Image: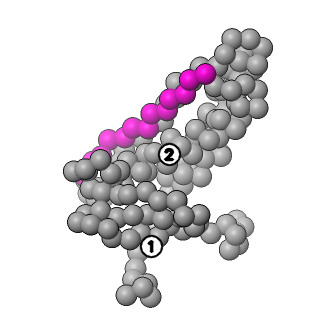
Amino acid sequence: MTSDAADQRSVSLEKIGEHRFRATNARGGTVVIGHGDDPDFTPVELLLAALAGCSALDVDFITGKRSPMETFEALAAATKIRDEQGNRLVDISVTFDITFPEGEAGDAARKVLPDAIKKSETRLCTVGRTVSVGTPVTYGEGALS
């Protein structure tokens, strides 16, 4: 296993209202997080979006070398449960509905699509691999207080 400071990823979170937070990445991008009583994404929805988005990028990079997509839709879904292990998601799935244009380039993209999805699932998608393999998460107080 190799990593260095250039591999470090982080997001800061700022409270912006009652049960609402703004996440900001190192590039200045933001997303508002809520608890589900407003249009803001919940943390669970963000995880599902990250799973679908990570694989979508993988699939797009691989198939896009052959042909642009005509249509693209990905659906990430899961069931939230509470059991002796606490609150968690089970039955997590990501499904794709993608079309490519007719012709040789579209045929080439269609041919590699199943392999692109499999590569994303088993090797490429950092978000999906982290969830599948499992990584301990530590929580604590920092020097921000």
Q: Is residue 14 left or right of residue 133?
A: left
- Residue depicted at 67% across the width and 20% down the height: 110
- Residue depicted at 44% across the width and 88% down the height: 143
Q: Which of 106/32 is in front? A: 32
Task: Kindly report the distance in space between the C-alpha atoms of the residues bearing marks 2 and 1.
Answer: 21 Å
Q: Amino acid at mark 1?
A: Thr
Residue 39 location, x and y as percent? 29, 47
Q: Is residue 32 left or right of residue 133?
A: left
Number of residues whose C-alpha sits closer than 10 Å to that of mark 2, classed few (under 14), some (14–19) or many (20 or more) = many
Q: In the structure shown, which secondary structural element does the residue marked by tag 1 occupy?
A: loop
Residue 12 location, x and y as percent? 47, 70
Q: In the structure shown, which secondary structural element does the residue marked by tag 2 occupy?
A: helix
- Residue depicted at 35% across the width and 58% down the height: 33
Q: Which of 121/99 is in front? A: 99
Number of residues whose C-alpha sits closer than 10 Å to that of mark 1, classed few (under 14), some (14–19) or many (20 or more) = few
- Residue depicted at 42% across the width and 51% down the height: 46
Residue 55 location, x and y as percent? 58, 41
Residue 136 in sight: no
Label ID, residue 51: 2
Q: Amino acid at mark 2?
A: Leu
Q: Is residue 117 magenta?
A: no
Against 13, residue 50 (above or below) is above
Residue 44 location, x and y as percent? 36, 51
Q: Quadrant of residue 91?
A: top left
Which residue was labeled with disc 1?
138
Name the magenta segment's main secondary structure: strand
Q: Which residues are magenta?
A: 70-82
